Amino acid sequence: MSPTITTSSEANGNVSAATARAAASAAALSEAAGPQPVTMAKALNTALADAMHADPSVLVFGEDVGMLGGVFRITDGLTATFGEQRCFDTPLAESGIVGMAVGMAINGMRPVIEMQFDAFAYPAFEQIVSHVAKMHNRTKGAVKLPMVIRVPYGGGIGGVEHHCDSSESYYAHTAGLKVFTPATVADGYRMLREAIDSDDPVIFMEPKKLYWSKDLVDLAELRTAHSAAASAGQSSEGRAAVARPGTDATLIAYGPSVPTALAAAEAAALEGRSLEVIDVRTLVPFDDETVCESVRKTGRAVVIAEAHGFASVSSEIVARVQERCFHHLAAPIRRVTGFDIPYPAPKLEKYYLPGVDRILDAVDDLQWEN
Amino acid sequence: MTISADHTAHPDTTSQAPAEDALAEAAKKFGITAEDYMLPARHQIEMVDPDGRLKPQGEQGTELGHEYPLPGDDELLAAYEQLVVGRRVNDQNSALVRQGRMAVYPSSHGQEACQVAAALCLSKGDWMFPTYRDAVAVMTRGVDPVQVMTIFRGDWHGGFDPLQHKVGIQCTPLTTQLLHAVGVAHAAKLRGEDTVVLAMCGDGATSEGDFHEALNFAAVFHLPVIFFVQNNKYAISVPLAHQSVAPSLAHKAVGYGMAGERVDGNDVVALLAVLDRAVALCRGGSGPLLVEANTYRMQAHTNADDDTRYRESSEVAEWRAKDPVNRMRTYLTDRGLLDDDGEARIREKAEAVATQLRDGLSEDVPVDPQELFRHVFEKTTPQLREQSALLADELARDAASTSDSKEAGK
């Protein structure tokens, strides 16, 4: 494994500090009341701790997730709280991590495993595609694989090669996998809890540039809401969210691109254009209904994703919307995606990533003169 | 060392004991060094020679710390019965493929001793993870023969419930199942269960990355897994010499810090002796282990393969003389454990299984196209519901037009 590259000082907290924070991170009850500024990393960490509290079969393992708490500190404090049997480091082998998780899931556990970086998950591709995705179908549902594969993904953190891939399309393309990606702190908590509860395997794509983004959220309230929804058998799986309502055009985004889309909508509003922003949330299953309802209303759409555009989730979204909303469209659907090039070096990534200007240019192109 | 609903963390040193301590302990138990415990004995373990004669104890390949008591008579008779059934099943299935009643069948003809021993060494609560060539082992484990062969019949990818039988799916991607075996053993260990897991692969498969990862994980987490390698000398056409130049495949164990052993894979007596001991060691906490069985794939890889392109018929003939079934028949007959009546009874049983297979596989099982969508997820998706409706509509229109044309033809 190559060394972890990150530009965030928060991701480099030393181990003793991590240990000192450990009790607090899992002792959920000590949280301050009411909405507080919370990072996505903290929300994910709390979701893991809460899931481990709720169900002794939930196990967390991967590379550096134990004592260190993960290179992004998402598993911070879990070993201290739950012991080395429930949160532990494995040998450095991604196929081994996923394959062992398959066996554990076969034998009654609910593993939540971490692939350290998007591109480091590729050695596990065979296990994911040939077994994680197929076991339920092959055994006619006799064997369920309730496992979550957490994948920190995407760029925008000044990371070097192999640390910034947007790999979601590989998983979304594979029949039998569910693919979630949160864009808000609250969704970080909610969707990870739902992924762990799911009896289907979930690839949980975590936008790493949003790990340190903060929202005002009430973790205690999220926890209560999750318990209530879970006992009622409800889940937000397969439901997109209207992140910002608007009337003139729809920006369809997910994961790391949602804040960019929201910034573009904010800028457009200053120019008198009202853009609706849809946060897709779960790539599989895809919420055709919410997305198409918005596009039928606005008549115009731009799909935004960091990943390469060619043969991707973004191309799938365009195809689906076009098939379902053709007669409501005032203009061809546009896409703003990463170029079809290997992820660039840190000093070049700003030219690659979809940004506000490129999104607004695409919006301008939506045949307003008609 | 168990996981309970008590969520408090206990600093538990025993469960995290480094593997080297466990190895040292095992070595101490047998009065040899850790290296001698891990390294396979100098020669393979072989108890009954190809002519069916019990070898003198000094020539069985055993050594200090690598001692193997002869299995009991009942166990050997039960194994012989399964050998005869297994051989009959292999040959029946090959015939069904030739008749076009089975899509494909990777036969274990010649490897029946490995197949039978792999299943018989395990207890009811143990798990087995087989490959596509291990149908006889799965059957010997007690799975209904027709259910086992469903994978090759073509109406679904598998016919038995892995959880019910504690037998993994017959795995086609090489050595990926070894990691599933590791996970099953790990989960059992965390719950404090004494489950042993036997994971099977072939000689060619030892070149795969997952072979390495599985052995290393099992050793590092100190798990009760037996890696059982059937070295049948060929990976389709590629001979062992192109896969590995290790002194033996069993020698790979030492690199992971686990014990390895070589055994005559056509001698079911030696196989049971070695595997029974491996199971006992694993159950007692001295696992994992690697066992290499030296055997031979007597037939082509599958019916689609032509083995005359890559091996000499003289080599095949040489191995025919080491046949595991004949060898055992001679041994048991000479020892007075098997007579003509016993042999006839066993053959009758084998014939009954063959009949069951012929009937079961000739049956035209109706397929339900909607089943295509039913099992993809535990909780299905709107997209699959849509596609399922599309297919239903297509089929309804087909049916309507067929009945229309019948009406018109009246």
Image (cartoon, coloured by chain):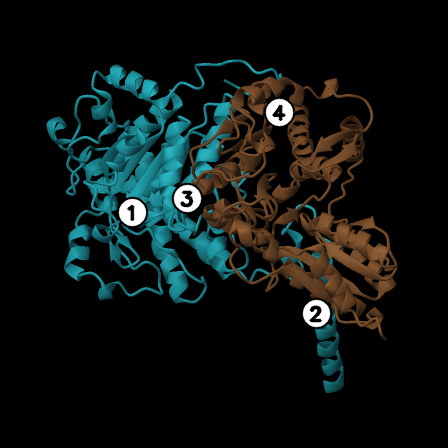
Chain colours: A brown, B cyan
Q: Position of residue B324 (x, y in %)?
A: 24, 44
Please check whether the numbered discs 1 and 3 fall on a single chain. Answer: yes
What's the mark number on residue A56? Answer: 4
What's the mark number on residue B395? Answer: 2
Q: Chain of mark 2?
A: B
Q: Position of residue B129 (x, y in %)?
A: 43, 40
- Establish if B47 lies above or below B170: above
Residue type indicated by callout 2: Leu
The CA span between labels 3 and 4 is 30 Å
Please check whether the numbered discs 3 and 2 fall on a single chain. Answer: yes
Direction from residue B86 to residue B50 in the image, left or right: left
Disc 3: which residue: B130
Direction from residue B21 to residue A91 in the image, left or right: right
The CA span between labels 4 and 1 is 39 Å
Please check whether the numbered discs 3 and 4 fall on a single chain. Answer: no
Give the camera-side residue of B31 and A320: A320
Along the polypeptide, which appears first: circle 1 or circle 3? 3
Q: Chain of mark 4?
A: A
> Can residue B81 be seen in this snapshot?
no
Q: Chain of mark 1?
A: B
The CA span between labels 3 and 2 is 38 Å
> Can residue A147 be seen in this snapshot?
yes
